[in-house]
Amino acid sequence: MKADELQEFLHAADRAAGCPAVGQSIAPRVRRRAARRRLVRRITVAAVVPVVAASWLALHRNSIEAPKAEPVAITMPSDSVEEAARIAQQTAEDILRMRDRQAETAMGHRGDPAARLDRELDETAMIFLAIGDQRVGQPGAAAEAVMAYRRVRDGFAKTPAAAIAAERLRQLQL
Amino acid sequence: MQSTARITPAESQADGPELLRRFVAGDGAAFDRIVAIYSPRVAGLAFRLLGWSGDLDDVVQDVFLAVFEQAGKFRGGSSLWTWITAITLNRCRVHWRRRRLRRLLMLRPAMTESARAADGKAIEDETSLAVRAAVAELPSRLREVVVLYYLEELPVAEISAAVGASVGAVEVRLHRARQKLRLVLARLIEEQKK
């Protein structure tokens, strides 16, 4: 078959099929469809965007890490040191009273009050000394340690802990 | 073919690009003119691409909806008709696929050429029916180039721009389409020769 023959066949068949007919008012109908599509697009975006955003947040919530805090040197103010010392002293006194009661109960008689007072003072001074030792090892808490040592040296001068506190103060001042 | 606006003798498809420019600039009436000028050709092309049948109203509306929404994308690299032809090809492919799917799902019985002839709406000779059936049976890519080359009589360069393929690829498709049509139509030609 030659190309001309094929073309002839095709044109004849096309002519025989007739002219297509389409409806009227194409342009207004196209405009209405375009307006509807714009509206649907807006509604879809308005509906989808929050859902997508919520999904994204839900997916990434676990992977969001809190910012790492810089190390901060926490120093206890002097009022707090005083309060801590007061509480420690109170606790020590309570412990000593409890032990004394236990000892008295065991011995069946009350001990010498003067000896008991000395013992209580010794133990309280040791507690303050321990507080000073704890503070001196902490960065930025040297002033609190000095305060605790001075309290032992001046307030419990007759106890063995006072000599130790004085020695510690000397070392710190050096 | 009925159009939405009367075309004055002075108007032709040469005015298309200018009308499209005016439409993009906000002149709504220019779109009406574009539809009036091009809708007969779009309908004819779609009619042939869909195997001389189908819902032309839907296809023509789809084509001009695309023109309406994408007018700003026309860069003038090809003629306006080539651009509209490319849109029509795309829309016809979609409609063709939908139609085939419907037939596969038995949602709508196929309206064959012989059935159309039988219902009295299109009484045609057997040769024309066979030719159209042979073209309709071609794969989409081949059917498109046959319609554009032989019936729309577009040059190969314009066909290549419309289908988005090289000139060589279009020529190869034309060659393959001719071979297939020759095989199918050989019997008819022999009968005619006798």
Image (cartoon, rainbow, N blue to C red):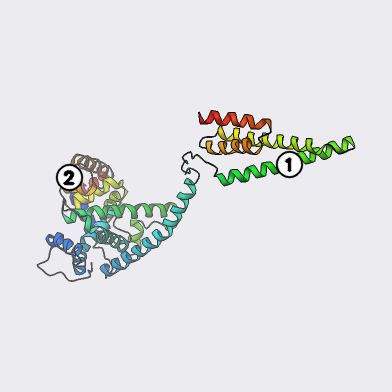
**Helix, strand or loop at mark 1:** helix
Q: Residues within 10 Å of mark 1 (few under 14, many from 20)?
A: some
Q: Is residue A85 left or right of residue A69?
A: right
Q: Is residue B44 left or right of residue B93?
A: left
Please give the chain letter of the residue carrying mark 1: A
Q: Residues within 10 Å of mark 2 (few under 14, many from 20)?
A: few
Q: Quadrant of the N terminus of chain A?
A: top left
Of the residues shown, which amino acid type is indicated by label 2?
Answer: Ala
Is B125 drawn above or below residue A137 in the view shown?
Answer: below
Residue B114 image-quadrant placement: bottom left
Residue A142 in percent (x, y) is at 53, 36
- The answer to whether residue A136 is seen in the rendering is yes
Viewer-side residue, A23 vs A130: A130
Of badges 1 and 2, nearer the viewer stands 1
- The answer to whether residue A6 is seen in the rendering is no
Is A7 drawn above or below residue A35 in the view shown?
Answer: above
Viewer-side residue, B183 vs A83: A83
Please give the count of numbered marks on the rendered protein: 2
Please give the chain letter of the residue carrying mark 2: A
Q: Which residue is denoted by mark 1 in the rendering?
A: A93
Viewer-side residue, A65 vs A11: A65
Of labels 1 and 2, earlier in sequence is 2
Is A171 drawn above or below residue A156 in the view shown?
Answer: above
Q: Which residue is denoted by mark 2 in the rendering?
A: A3
